[in-house]
Image (cartoon, rainbow, N blue to C red):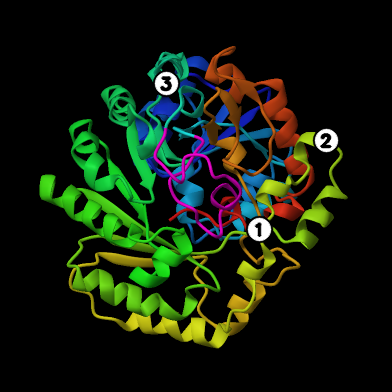
Amino acid sequence: MIIPKTDKKNIVIWGFDNKSLEYYYALLELITDKNIFICNYVSQFESESNSLDRKILDYDFTITLENVFDMKNDVSIIILNDYYNKFYSIVELGWIEENNIQIIPHLELVRIYATNICNANCVMCDIGTASKKGIDKLRVDTENEIPISTIEKLLESPLLKENKMKFSLGMVEPLIHRDIGKIVGLISSKGHSVAVITNGILLERKAKELIENNVDYVMVSIDGTEHIHDKIRGRKGIYRKAINGIKRLHEIQPNMKVVINCCISNLNYGGLYDLIKGIENEKLNVEVRFQHLYFVSKKMADNHNSTVEDYRLKQTQSSIGEESIATDIDFYVLSQQIKKIKRIKLNYISSIRFRPPYTEPIELSNYYNLSGQPLEGLDKCFFPYNQVSIKTNGDVVFHTRCYNYVIGNMLEKDINDIFNGNDANIFREILKKNKYCFCACTRCCGIMGGW
């Protein structure tokens, strides 16, 4: 296991999975001059820690973390992904900044740009609306897909050999990649989990290939009933292809985890309940996730660009959403749709969730306000501390199309050196100075927490 370097006297491991156990025991073996605290599995640590005369913090959600924060600047903290995914909105996360606690980067999620083209023309996507390449006819050129050799080099990194990662193949349309099954197989064969996010156009054709290579779950984008979805996605027949693809997955592997993700916008907000009824009528055993549209208005971009000096952090035109998509919504109607969905009796859908979990008209109106004011409890992004995205040319950024801030290239350096390198740490320091949320980040998935 690779242990983050720290000159702090006290180390806090903050998490709720087996990774906390691994870190704890590794720290006991390698670090002899520091106090180590952990917030979970306390009973399992008691005998070994006592024999080494170590202090253990028994953390309970009924108490505060004041005893940790009393350490002030003499503490490092390892925050594990499962922690802030499950308890993202609690006030304790705000104390990280207020008490100047250092967060140690800990890579857990790797996003792969399998391709940089798409076979849809989604109206709310900068790629779909700006790029025609690969849309009119399915064509894959070598320079438009990530080489297998890049994946192989990534998997040979000591960091990935010693730590099991979560992989997400969701950019741009992964099923276009001619070797998508091989990529999934390479990753899964090393013990990492693999998710594929797709528009579903090629899913029926690729289902067997994905399952044979041990994909963990598949997320399919469906934004409304058949007519609405096809209109949003820019191609007739996409809805039916996606539905048939899901059915094919379950024909091959009945217990395959499938998630349908719906992006709420002014184009579909009045038909969300009908979408759920349609999925039920198709008898699909799936999870359904509704996400409110992530966007950057011109005002948000202008405010952002006036506050950052590094040119790599300037808000780029490609990620500035069309403001019309974030407006023209009747928030009362949307609220009624959400409430109606929450009351529905489900026979096939296993769960329905909304992100962010807003229900009332005033909450929804505040979210879609183009000023982009920070949302209470959802105003900090820790993605740069636990994940990276790798583009087709090997460039590594923190997350998809946030900023064109390249922290390294897989063809030149090991992923551990990139993730813990100078450019990565500069970005984190700038983010920290901006209270972990830039002006252009307030309506992005990074501050919304996990599912």
Q: Secondary structure at mark 3?
A: helix
The alpha-carbon separation of the residues under discs 1 and 2 comes to 22 Å
Q: Main secondary structure of the magenta part?
A: loop
- Three-letter code for the amino acid on which mark 1 is drawn: Gly
In this figure, which residue is indicated by the disc labeled 2? 310
Residue 162 forms part of the magenta stretch? no
Task: Name the residue nearer the viewer: 54 or 363.
Answer: 363
Magenta residue span: 116-139
- Three-letter code for the amino acid on which mark 2 is drawn: Asp
In this figure, which residue is indicated by the disc labeled 3? 151
Task: Name the residue nearer the viewer: 345 or 200.
Answer: 200
Using the image, tell me which numbered label, if any, was put on residue 321: 1
Residue 211's x, y, as percent?
20, 37
Q: Secondary structure at mark 2?
A: loop
Where 264 sits versus 205, above or below? Answer: below
10 Å crowding of disc 3: few (<14), some (14-19), many (20+): some
Task: Name the residue nearer the viewer: 186 or 7.
Answer: 186
- Which residue is depicted at the point 30% across and 60% down? 287
Where 4 sits versus 329, above or below? Answer: above
Residue 82's x, y, as percent?
44, 46
Where 252 sits versus 21, above or below? Answer: below
Where 403 sits versus 235, above or below? Answer: above
- Which residue is depicted at the point 55% across and 23% down? 393
